Image (cartoon, rainbow, N blue to C red):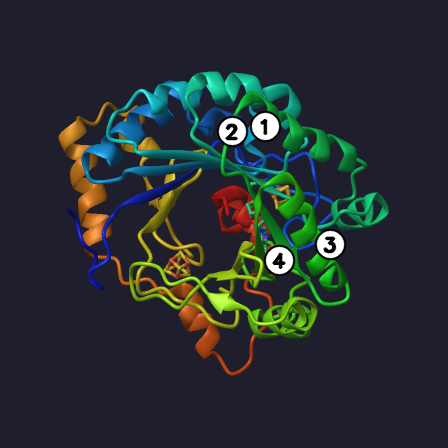
């Protein structure tokens, strides 16, 4: 097992398959225009799967397909099949906005994908339109239904909660998930690259989420889980479990085993990292497996990133990167490196 400088293992890989997206969520892609990764740089399925196999040999057992919107890449189920065939990969999941999920669910299931997470921030079609600048709310709901119908179990729904936008829907989202047998995770609005409209006063914090839900449901208990991270799963008096991802107000980087590979083969050791490691160039230049492994091992064993904690320690906190900075380097975008 390879450990970084803070003794964290290389275990989990987020694989962004495209930087394109069919929504324009306010907290992720608020601009009118975007600079995209050059098409010629986008890894083929074979290239992406070769890199995943190498990561797996170095200890990665969890892979999450993401983006941009992963289902915009039409052949993503083929890639899922290639990855699912690797016996070292114990957990293969996707995070999707759900818009194209109804069409893709069967193929993903047949390909051997294990788990699906759908991002859904609101149950109100008009609010969805305002938040995403697209009219696709019904498609998302149909996508969720289709995923369950084809047989995916343990569906998760991720909801970014923003003050003044949807903090009044905590209970509705929770009840909706209860009804369909999914687990909801409330996510604090993060100051990641791309969130150019971010400000602290729009963050609806973990403490506020717990307070609002306690008011509605009564006593909420943390779910005690292995490890020593602060609880991010909670249980209501009736047994309903939900999660909170509080990377803004209560970050916890000390157990972070995640890294991210962008669609053009740039490897980031932290969501907040300013620079990544180019794996595409050596891959395309014919580097051997041993050479690629050595690049990855030296990257990981030199890792000391704790981006969210460092942001939390700042006295004055503003958007991470300006719109102009993002145009200069689209790799800094959340929608490029995958959430
Ligand atoms: N397009 C897919 C989706 O939305 O599920 C996958 C990629 S998206 C970048 C992954 C996750 O990042 C989504 O759940 C999204 O809500 C989250 N996200 C994007 N920008 C965020 C921000 N500023 N704060 C918190 N979460 C964010
Ligand atoms: Fe929204 Fe995901 Fe697209 Fe970002 S990548 S705009 S979070 S759907
Ligand atoms: Fe991991 Fe970086 Fe996120 Fe911290 S900020 S949890 S180190 S990806």
Label 3 crowd (10 A; few <14 / some 14-19 / many >=20): few
* Pick the front one: 337 or 242: 242
Label 2 crowd (10 A; few <14 / some 14-19 / many >=20): some
**Mark in front: 4 vs 2:** 2
Residue farthest toward the right in the current orientation of the protein: 126
Relative height, residue 295 to residue 311 (above, below): above
Dot 4 corresponds to which residue? 195
Which structural element holds mark 2? loop
Q: Position of residue 173 (x, y in %)?
A: 69, 52
Q: Is ligand 1 closer than 8 angstroms to the Cβ of mark 4? A: yes
Which residue is rendered at x = 51% and y = 83% of the image?
Answer: 315
- The quarter of the displayed image where residue 225 is located: bottom left
The reply to whether the C-beta atoms of the residues labelled 2 and 1 are less than 8 Å apart is yes
* Pick the front one: 43 or 71: 71
Counting residues from the start of the chain, the first of labels 4 and 2 encountered is 2
**Ligand 3 lies in quarter:** bottom left
**Mark in front: 4 vs 3:** 3
Q: CA distance from mark 3 to mark 1?
A: 21 Å
Relative height, residue 19 to residue 39 (above, below): below
287 relative to 92 in the view: left or right:
left
The reply to whether the C-beta atoms of the residues labelled 4 and 3 are less than 8 Å apart is no
The reply to whether the C-beta atoms of the residues labelled 4 and 2 are less than 8 Å apart is no
Which structural element holds mark 1? helix
Q: CA distance from mark 1 to mark 4?
A: 29 Å
Dot 1 corresponds to which residue? 147
Counting residues from the start of the chain, the first of labels 1 and 4 encountered is 1
Dot 3 corresponds to which residue? 172
Residue 152 badge: 2
Residue 165 badge: none
Q: CA distance from mark 2 to mark 1?
A: 6 Å
């Amino acid at each position: 097992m390879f450990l970084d400088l803070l003794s964290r293992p290389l275990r989990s890989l987020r694989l962004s398959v495209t930087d394109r997206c069919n929504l324009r969520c306010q907290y992720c892609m608020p601009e009118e225009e975007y600079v995209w990764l050059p098409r010629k740089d986008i890894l083929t399925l074979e290239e992406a799967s070769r890199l995943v196999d190498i990561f797996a040999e170095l200890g990665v057992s969890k892979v999450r397909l993401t983006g941009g919107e992963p289902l915009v890449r039409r052949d993503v189920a083929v890639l899922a099949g290639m990855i699912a065939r690797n016996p070292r990969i114990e957990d293969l999941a996707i995070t999707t906005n759900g818009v194209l999920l109804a069409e893709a669910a069967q193929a993903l299931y047949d390909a051997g994908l294990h788990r699906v997470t759908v991002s859904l921030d609101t149950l109100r079609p008009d609010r969805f339109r305002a938040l995403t600048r697209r009219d696709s709310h019904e498609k998302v709901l149909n996508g969720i239904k289709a995923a369950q119908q084809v047989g995916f179990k343990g569906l998760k729904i991720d909801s970014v909660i923003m003050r003044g936008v949807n903090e009044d829907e905590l209970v509705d989202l929770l009840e909706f998930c209860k009804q369909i047998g999914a687990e909801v995770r409330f996510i604090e609005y993060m100051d990641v690259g791309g969130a150019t409209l971010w400000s602290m006063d729009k963050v609806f914090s973990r403490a506020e989420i717990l307070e609002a839900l306690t008011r509605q449901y009564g006593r909420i208990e943390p779910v005690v889980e292995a490890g020593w991270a602060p609880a991010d799963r909670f249980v209501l008096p009736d047994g309903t479990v939900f999660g909170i991802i509080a990377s803004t107000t209560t970050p916890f980087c000390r157990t972070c085993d995640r890294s991210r590979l962008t669609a053009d083969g740039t490897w980031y050791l932290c969501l907040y990292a300013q620079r990544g490691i180019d794996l595409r160039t050596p891959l395309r230049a014919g580097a051997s497996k041993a050479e690629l492994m050595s690049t990855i091992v030296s990257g990981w064993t030199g890792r000391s990133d704790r981006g969210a904690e460092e942001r939390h320690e700042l006295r004055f906190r503003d958007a991470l990167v300006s719109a102009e900075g993002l145009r200069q380097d689209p790799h800094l975008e959340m929608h490029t490196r995958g959430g």
